[in-house]
């Protein structure tokens, strides 16, 4: 068998000759399988191509019965070939017939072959076919043979993707996918509706030359390109974009680490040694990496491999002279960016005046890009599987971030309906904008304080465009979630200083780290827990690891030196816990004073009320806090023992019920009794009807998503609070499951704008 280092090179040279011959596509494939079989001293070589409906069809063979060509078909996951396609992983089996996945196809006559080596044919991370060699003897193919077959598979990927195989298709599979309308359902990552035109985030890098003519020259090209890449990453890291520097420098640091990784470089050089051009070598190594990425269940590793993938793409672009991501191209006025996945920094690279929506094939609600999309107020959808194959740059697309639906090339009727929806939304926005500088005053007088919830620097402009009074909840964990390791003191100080600076004198309530449950730090290994929402999280973790909390408090107080500052603690379950948090603050204050720093003044410390046990501790707790904030997301989840993230339970219990509203009223009454300000910062406060219910139990301050400020203010300005109180009094004493219909009716009857 041709196992010398020259083996693959000879094979590639022969393949190049065949590819240059002016013959019909089927003939070319027939020749290719002959050449591979001869070069690898295999008795069988077969190519299976992925057809619509996830069917792998035998396209060419040397060794199996020829009548099976275009007849033998396997579904993805079926037989050895289907398993390779499904898992994007090669199989090297000395005795294939006894493998549990083996499926005998009588028309092929393959019963006499025992040894089997198959590899996926991949393109852009997708399996588009399978390449197989077989021998009669029971033997294990060597690693070199596996490598050679993988390299060959890559060259074949180009032949298949070049499209010339369409003419040999056994059924007409003209590219109907690209002219038809499609309706996909993914997961909603960020609300809102957008109509626009698709922009492929990563315009495909087309590799023209796969096979090296001069191996030393290709190595030099690789070295040059890698040097450029390293310089480019350094430049990004040392760049002056302050926002990117604090929020994303860790991601770039990881990329820099990969760029200097010897193992990666060696794999690239070895791939060139097999006879590939520098760019083909990058793609080859990238394919291996993507296949591993698909298989690893570890989210942290997946993120790191994604970083490596990102780096390979940058290198490919340098080698081929292709443009970077579409953010640097001339965008259409209504761009809907479509990507397999992307990092938060990449999304921020797009011109925001043209960006209308984002659709990802991967990406979950808690992914970093989703957090940024929500912060930017751009509708976004994740898990839209297969979308990239269905769109071209410029395809009309509708994104419905509310339902998670994506429509590709929608009918004119649908476009019209959605355009109306968008116009309606825009009209409403214009009305709210007109209220921006108006105070949130109730119909009969009395002011309601409206604040925004925030968690990123990009949220801060919303504080001013919405006309909100301040930031009622700054979720500090988001900076930690976007980083690849714990942000250091200086990074934290810089981040908090920027927030304070951008708030331009409006108050900001910082909440200390609230991690755990769905808020995962990729670099923090946490023990697996049965009930993470009830587990070792948030303040519990902070008090057990006081160094972390101390560092954060130090950073906050340094950022707020000499100015007013508000800090609150999440997930407090009893008075003792709050006192322990205060002790940590005292330690930090002493530490800073000793070093000659000035403390924030005044420094107000508060408690989040989101665990029901506190309802019976209020008389002890309120005297020792400066303020309280109701975390209704958690409070309601724990009151009803109903997971806030479980879609099956969504809507089952209503916060507009005597039970939940009663709990909030109790908190408000106790706060009044102890003369302490109380606010609410759960999602509840951002929905006008719910906000009305909250005012109905006495709240005078609410914090919400920035986009809700306008609608809630419009409601407040049309509400007669005394009338509402009277109306709600008996309802709160009732045993009803919900008082939502009654509140709705009240609003309608009294002209309250919802
Ligand atoms: C809450 O629980 O209501 C809250 C505001 O905190 P988070 O949503 O961040 O848990
Ligand atoms: Mg909470």
Image (tube, rainbow, N blue to C red):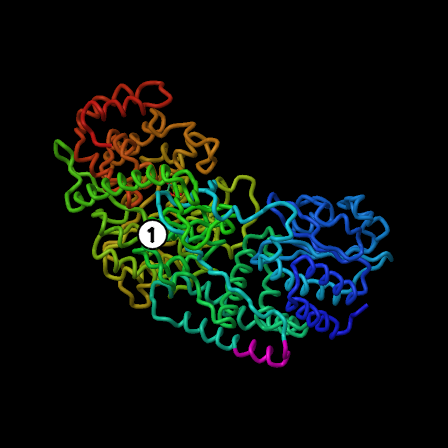
Tell me if residue 418 is in the magenta stretch: no
Name the spot of residue 454 as percent of width and height, x first.
32, 50
Q: Quadrant of ligand 2?
A: top left
- In the rendered image of this protein, does residue 221 appear above or below residue 119? below
Q: Quadrant of residue 730?
A: top left
Give the magenta range: 213-224
Name the residue tied to disc 1: 334
Q: Quadrant of residue 696?
A: top left
Q: Can the viewer see residue 499 in this picture?
A: yes
Q: In screen coordinates, is 439 left or right of 569?
A: left
Principal secondary structure, stretch drawn in magenta: helix
Tell me what residue is drawn at x 55 percent, y 67 percent.
Answer: 207
Category of crowding for the residue at label 1, using alpha-carbon neighbours closer than 10 angstroms: few (below 14), some (14–19), many (at least 20): some
Name the spot of residue 640 as percent of width and height, x first.
43, 29
Q: Can the viewer see residue 547 in this picture?
A: no
Q: Quadrant of the C terminus?
A: top left
Q: Residue furthest left?
A: 444
Instruction: Specify whether tag 1 is near ligand 1 (CB below 8 Å).
Output: no
Asked which secondary structure carries label 1, the reply is loop
Residue 549 or residue 153, whichever sits in front:
153
Q: Quadrant of residue 611?
A: top left
Tell me if residue 223 is in the magenta stretch: yes
Q: In screen coordinates, is 296 left or right of 341?
A: right
Name the spot of residue 593 as percent of width and height, x first.
30, 64
Residue 718 or residue 38, whichever sits in front:
38
Name the spot of residue 701 as percent of width and height, x first.
24, 40
Residue 45 or residue 240, whichever sits in front:
45
Q: Quadrant of the N terminus?
A: bottom right
Tell me what residue is drawn at x 59 percent, y 56 percent.
Answer: 293
Tell me what residue is drawn at x 79 percent, y 45 percent.
Answer: 107
């Amino acid at each position: 068998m041709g196992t010398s280092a020259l083996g693959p090179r000879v094979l590639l040279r022969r393949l190049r000759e065949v590819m240059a011959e002016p013959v019909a596509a089927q003939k070319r494939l027939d020749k290719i399988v002959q050449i591979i079989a001869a070069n690898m001293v295999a008795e069988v070589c077969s190519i299976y191509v992925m057809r619509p409906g996830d069917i792998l069809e035998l396209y060419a063979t040397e060794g199996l019965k020829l009548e099976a060509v275009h007849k033998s078909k396997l579904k993805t996951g079926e037989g050895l070939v289907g398993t390779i396609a499904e898992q994007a992983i090669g199989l090297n089996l000395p005795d294939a017939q006894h493998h549990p996945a083996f499926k005998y196809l009588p028309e092929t006559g393959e019963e006499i072959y025992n040894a089997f080596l198959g590899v996926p044919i991949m393109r852009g991370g997708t399996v588009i076919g399978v390449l197989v060699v077989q021998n009669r003897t029971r033997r294990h193919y060597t690693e070199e043979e596996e490598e050679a077959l993988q390299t060959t598979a890559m060259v074949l990927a180009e032949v298949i993707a070049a499209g010339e195989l369409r003419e040999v298709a056994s059924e007409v599979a003209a590219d109907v996918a690209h002219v038809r309308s499609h309706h996909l359902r993914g997961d909603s990552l960020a609300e809102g509706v957008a109509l626009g035109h698709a922009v492929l985030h990563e315009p495909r890098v087309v590799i023209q030359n796969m096979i090296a003519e001069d191996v030393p020259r290709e190595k030099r090209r690789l070295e040059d390109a890698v040097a450029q890449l390293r310089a480019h990453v350094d430049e990004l890291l040392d760049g002056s974009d302050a926002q990117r520097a604090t929020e994303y420098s860790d991601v770039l640091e990881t990329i820099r680490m990969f760029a200097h990784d010897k193992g990666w470089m060696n794999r690239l050089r070895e791939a060139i040694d097999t006879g590939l051009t520098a760019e083909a070598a990058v793609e080859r190594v990238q394919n291996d990496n993507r296949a591993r990425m698909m298989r690893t269940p570890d989210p942290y590793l997946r993120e790191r491999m994604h970083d490596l993938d990102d780096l390979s793409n940058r290198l490919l672009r340098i080698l081929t002279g292709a443009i970077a991501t579409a953010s640097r191209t001339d965008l259409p006025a209504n761009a809907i960016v479509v990507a397999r996945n992307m990092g938060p920094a990449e999304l921020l690279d797009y011109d925001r005046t043209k960006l209308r929506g984002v659709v990802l094939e991967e990406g979950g609600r808690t992914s970093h890009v989703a957090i940024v999309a929500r912060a930017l107020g751009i509708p976004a959808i994740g898990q839209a599987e297969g979308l990239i194959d269905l769109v071209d740059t410029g395809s009309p697309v509708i994104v419905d971030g509310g339902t998670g639906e994506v429509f590709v090339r929608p009918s004119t009727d649908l476009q019209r309906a959605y355009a109306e929806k968008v116009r309606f939304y825009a009209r409403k926005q214009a009305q709210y904008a007109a209220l921006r500088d108006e105070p949130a005053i109730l119909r009969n007088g009395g002011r309601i304080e409206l604040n925004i919830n925030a968690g990123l620097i990009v949220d801060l402009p919303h504080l001013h465009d919405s006309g909100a009074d301040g930031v009622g909840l700054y979720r500090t964990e988001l900076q930690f979630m976007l980083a690849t390791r714990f942000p250091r003191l200086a990074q934290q100080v810089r981040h908090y200083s920027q927030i304070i600076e951008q708030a331009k004198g409006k108050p900001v309530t910082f909440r200390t780290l609230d991690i755990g449950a769905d808020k995962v730090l990729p670099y923090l290994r946490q023990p697996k827990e049965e009930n993470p929402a009830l587990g070792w999280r948030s303040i519990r973790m902070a008090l057990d690891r006081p160094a972390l909390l101390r560092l954060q408090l130090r950073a906050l107080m340094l950022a707020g030196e000499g100015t007013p500052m508000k800090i609150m603690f999440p997930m407090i379950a009893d008075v003792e816990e709050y006192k322990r948090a205060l002790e940590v603050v005292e330690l930090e204050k002493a530490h800073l004073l000793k070093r000659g720093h000035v403390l924030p003044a005044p420094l107000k410390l508060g408690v989040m009320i989101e665990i029901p046990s506190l309802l019976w501790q209020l008389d002890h707790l309120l005297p020792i806090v400066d303020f309280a904030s109701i975390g209704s997301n958690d409070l309601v989840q724990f009151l009803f023992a109903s997971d806030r993230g479980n879609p099956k339970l969504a809507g089952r219990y209503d916060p507009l019920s005597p039970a939940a509203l009663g709990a909030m009223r109790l908190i408000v009454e106790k706060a009044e009794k102890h003369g302490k300000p109380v606010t609410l910062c759960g999602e509840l406060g951002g929905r006008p009807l719910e906000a009305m219910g909250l005012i109905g139990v006495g709240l005078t301050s609410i914090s919400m998503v920035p986009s809700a400020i306008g609608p809630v203010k419009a409601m407040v300005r049309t509400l007669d609070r005394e009338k509402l109180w009277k109306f709600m009094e008996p309802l709160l004493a009732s045993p009803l499951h919900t008082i939502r219909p009654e509140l709705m009716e009240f609003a309608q009857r009294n002209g309250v704008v919802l």
